Image (tube, rainbow, N blue to C red):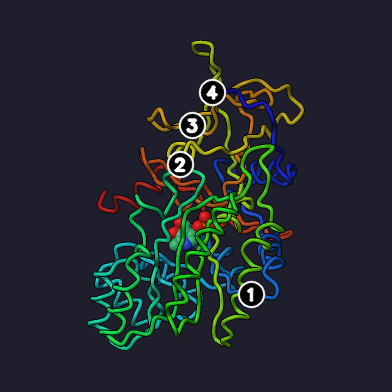
Amino acid sequence: MTETLLKKPQNEALLLQAAERYGTPTYVYEASTVRERIERLRSHLRGAPVQLLYAMKANGALPLLRIMKEEGLGIDAVSPAELELALRIGFEGNQILFSANNMTDDEMDFAAQEGVVLNIGELSRLERFGKKYPGESVCIRFNPQIGAGHHRHVITAGEKSKFGIPVAQTDEVLSLAHRFELNICGVHQHIGSGILDTETAWKACAVLLDVAAKFHSLRFINFGGGLGVPYRPGEQPLDMERWEDLIVSPLRTYRDRHPSPDLSFRFEPGRYLVAEAGTLLVRVNTVKESHGRTFAGVDSGMGHLVRPAIYNAYHATYNLSNPNGTCRIYDVVGNICESSDFFARDRAVQEIREGDVLAILDTGAYGISMASMYNIRSLPAEVFIDGTDHVVIRKRESPAELIDRLYPEL
Ligand SMILES: Cc1ncc(COP(=O)(O)O)c(C=O)c1O
C-alpha cells in the first residue's frame, strides 16, 4: 500500500545545519524533547508514589543518561555492561534494577555485590540466588499472561513468551522465598514495547496487582515500560489522560487500601522518553528506476537502523533538501547487501535528487543501540544538541580507522 501523508520534523533548519556541519550518516538527539517527555509523563503520575527508571537499552548515549540522572530517574539495566555503565555514571545501586535475561552465575554475583536488586524471571535462578544469598532482597519478574506491542517480536508476555515466571507459579515463588528466607522486595512485569493500547496494558497491570497482594514486604510494584509513540503520520500519540485514568488512578486507590510508607510503583520507559528526540540524517547517492519502482539509495542502512528490517517498522522520511518538492513514491534503501535493507517502502517523499539529505524521524530509541557494523561499515556519527550546545558524542570512523581498531595486528 502506498503511504501518502508526510510527517514533518520539528526543527528542519537545525537538522539541515547538522547535516552540513557533521556530514552523514549522523544521528542527532535533541535534549529539549527528552526533558519535555519526562515532564509530560510525570504530569500524569501526580498523587501516586511513582519512581521512573529509564530503560537504557533504548539508547545509552551518555548525555541522555546524564539527563535521566539529573532528572532523578533510576535505571533498568539488562546486561552486566549496562549495569557497569549505570554505576560509572553515578547511579546508586538502589536506583538500578538488574533484569538480565537468562542470567549467569557471574552476572548474578556482580549485581548482588554491587548492592543492586536483581529482577529474576526463572524459578531455577531464584533457587540459585536463594542458596547463595539467603535472606537477601530480590524482585520477581512475572509473566501476567497478557502481552502487547507494535510487532510480535516485541511482545514479552503471554503464552509464547520466554520472559518471566508465569503467575500460575506464584506459589512456587512463595515457597522458594520461604525456604531461603528471601525478602521479595518487588514484583515486576514488562509485557512488550510500543504499546498504544492502554486497555490491554491496564489488564496486565491488574494481574500484577493481584499477584502483589500475595507478597507482604514489597517496596515496589514495577509495571515495566512499553509506552508507545506515534510513528506514522495520522497515528495518535498515547492518550495520556486515558492512561492516567486507567492505569494511575487505580494505583492511587491501591495505595490508599494498602497504606505503606515504603511502597512505590515503578515504570521503566525507554522509547517514550527518547524515540522522538532522535533523527537519522542520511544522504542520497543513487536514484534509479527499476521495474516501475524508484529507488533512492542512501549512505546508511540496516546496520544503522534495523527496525524496518526486523519489525517492518515505519519511520517518517522527509527530504530536508527539497522541503517543497512534489511528493513522488519511493523505496528508500540502504547500502547493505541484504534485500531487507530499507528505510521506507512505497513511500511518498518530496522529489528526491542525488545529493539530497533525508531525515529519518523518530529514531532516538532502538536506533544506535541496535546498530551493527555488518559489511564492515562504520557506525554513524552521533550529535547531541542541548540549546545552543552541540556535542559530538560519536565520531564517524573512516574505513582505515575502523580497520585499525578491529584488526590492530595488521
Ligand atoms: C525489562 C524491560 N523494561 C523496559 C523496557 C523498555 O521498553 P520501552 O522502550 O518499550 O518502554 C524493556 C524493553 O525491551 C524491557 O525489556
CB within 8 Å, label 1 to label 2 = no
CB within 8 Å, label 4 to label 2 = no
Q: For the residues carrying marks 4 and 2, which lies nearer the camera in this image?
A: 2
Three-letter amino acid code of the residue under disc 3: Phe
Give the CA distance from mark 1 to mark 2: 42 Å
The residue at which mark 3 appears reads as 342
Which residue occupies the foreground of this view, 390 or 343?
343
The residue at which mark 2 appears reads as 306
Q: For the residues carrying marks 1 and 2, which lies nearer the camera in this image?
A: 1
Three-letter amino acid code of the residue under disc 1: Thr
Give the CA distance from mark 4 to mark 2: 21 Å
The residue at which mark 1 appears reads as 253
Query: Going from the N terminus, do you reach mark 1 or mark 2 first?
Result: 1
| Residue at figure coordinates x 33%, y 55% from the top left | 162
The residue at which mark 4 appears reads as 286
Three-letter amino acid code of the residue under disc 2: Val
Query: Going from the N terminus, do you reach mark 3 or mark 4 first?
Result: 4
Three-letter amino acid code of the residue under disc 4: Thr
Instruction: Tell which residue pokes out farthest to the top in this image.
Output: 291
Tell me the quarter of the picture where residue 243 sits: bottom right
Instruction: Tell which residue pokes out farthest to the right in this image.
Output: 324
Q: Secondary structure at mark 3?
A: strand
Tell me the quarter of the picture where residue 189 sits: bottom left
Query: Going from the N terminus, do you reach mark 2 or mark 3 first?
Result: 2
CB within 8 Å, label 2 to label 3 = no
Q: Position of residue 178 (x, y in %)?
A: 30, 84
Q: Within 10 Å of the Cα at label 2, are there few (<14), some (14-19), or many (20+) other Cα atoms?
A: many
Give the CA distance from mark 2 to mark 3: 9 Å
Residue 374 is left or right of residue 316, and the answer is: left
Q: Secondary structure at mark 4?
A: strand
Give the CA distance from mark 3 to mark 4: 14 Å
